[in-house]
Image (cartoon, grey):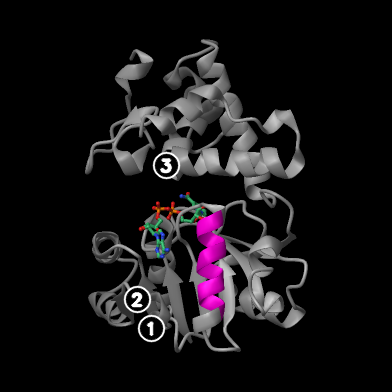
Amino acid sequence: MNISVIGAGQMGNGIAHVFAQSGHSVTLIDIAQASLDKGLATIGKNLDRQVAKGSITEEQKLATLKNIAGSTDMAAGVRAAELVVEAATENVDLKLKIFKDLDAHAPAGCILATNTSSISITRIAAVTKRPQQVIGMHFMNPVPVMKLVEVIRGYDTSDTVTTTVVDLSTAIGKVPVTVNDYAGFIANRILMPMINESIEALFQGVGGVSEIDAIMKLGMAHPMGPLQLADFIGLDTCLAILRVLHEGFGNPKYAPCPLLVQMVTAGKLGVKSGEGFYVHTPGSKELVVSPAFGK
Ligand SMILES: NC(=O)c1ccc[n+]([C@@H]2O[C@H](COP(=O)([O-])OP(=O)(O)OC[C@H]3O[C@@H](n4cnc5c(N)ncnc54)[C@H](O)[C@@H]3O)[C@@H](O)[C@H]2O)c1
């Protein structure tokens, strides 16, 4: 299948990776050449790691890389697409603009999927002339490792399109789970209030970063504490999702913690900026709490 992926960030390069590894022909598109180069380099590094672990061969790595082309020209990059998966920055206006453009440039039969964490699929679909072909395909981070694809049906998404996306997800080794389109769907409707509450507990001084994460790891058997997970997802993405939940349900329980707002304003976005609740040094796996939080 010809698949175009929009956005070469942490999710987009992972999505391109898994499709290409399953033999699909992928065009990875980003608005910025530097982000595209970084995304392609990340795919190379992740494939090297898979080879080192023995989970794929050198030949499979080369075949995967051969299946991926990069582009900064969206109109040209989707011209032959049968499926587009959009994984650009989590911003409503940006996504509405991208889907208007995709509708204008992608072939009539092309399915337009979005990897949005929280933005209404129905709202995105409504700016196109093909709402029955618009669907949520929500991969989890890191995409090559995580099995789940949350498949979200918008108000008009057709059964045929849903079946195609479910079957494709299964064929690339993922486990699709289909849900309906309400703010946050299922994954983030449940995850984000937990992360927000952890930040609130930190903000109120109930516990420190290490204590909060240790309690959730050891007490609830979570593989990673909520603050570490927030850093990993990106604090800007967490804030954007909470704002969608807050606005979508009109319920104050989803209001983002002021500390989260402050950190995003200061550019402390977690792993992607090098600092969030922890300090992230490339190549180091050591968990070092940010000096802003004392220890
Ligand atoms: N980070 C996560 O854990 C996670 C998990 C599931 C879903 N998502 C969703 O995936 C999407 C991407 O998130 P991310 O974490 O990869 O973000 P990111 O910031 O790492 O990457 C976003 C990329 O989009 C590019 N971009 C921005 N505008 C563009 C445009 N007009 N055309 C093409 N590219 C454009 C940016 O240059 C950047 O490279 C968001 O919708 C997010 O909610 C994120």
Most foreground residue, 240 or 50: 240
Q: Nearer the viewer, residue 240 or 15?
A: 240
Q: How many marks?
A: 3
Label number found at residue 76: 1
Query: Which label number is shown at residue 46?
Result: none
Q: Position of residue 128 (x, y in %)?
A: 64, 74
Residue 286: where, in percent of width, then height?
A: 28, 32
Mark 2 crowd level (few <14, some 14–19, many ≥20, 10 Å Cα): few
Q: Tell me the element at label 3.
A: helix
Q: Residue at x 25, y 78 (%)?
A: 62
- Give neighbour class at mark 3: few <14, some 14-19, many 20+ (Cα, 10 Å): many
> At which x and y percent is residue 120?
67, 57
Report the quarter where the C terminus lies. Answer: top left
The secondary structure that most of the magenta stretch takes on is helix
Pointer 1 with pointer 2, Cβ within 8 A: yes
Look at mark 3 in the image and give the residue it sits on.
232
165, 55: nearer the viewer: 165
**Do labels 3 and 1 touch, CB within 8 Å?**
no
- Magenta stretch? 93-103
Q: Mark 3 near ligand 1 (CB under 8 Å)?
A: yes
Residue corresponding to mark 2: 73
Q: Between 222 and 15, which is closer to the camera in this rendering?
A: 15
Q: Does the Cβ of the disc 1 residue fall within 8 Å of ligand 1?
A: no
The residue at 58%/44% (across/down) is 241
- C-alpha gap between disc 3 and disc 1: 32 Å
Above or below for 281 versus 203: below
Q: Quadrant of residue 113?
A: bottom right
Q: Is residue 170 left or right of residue 87?
A: right
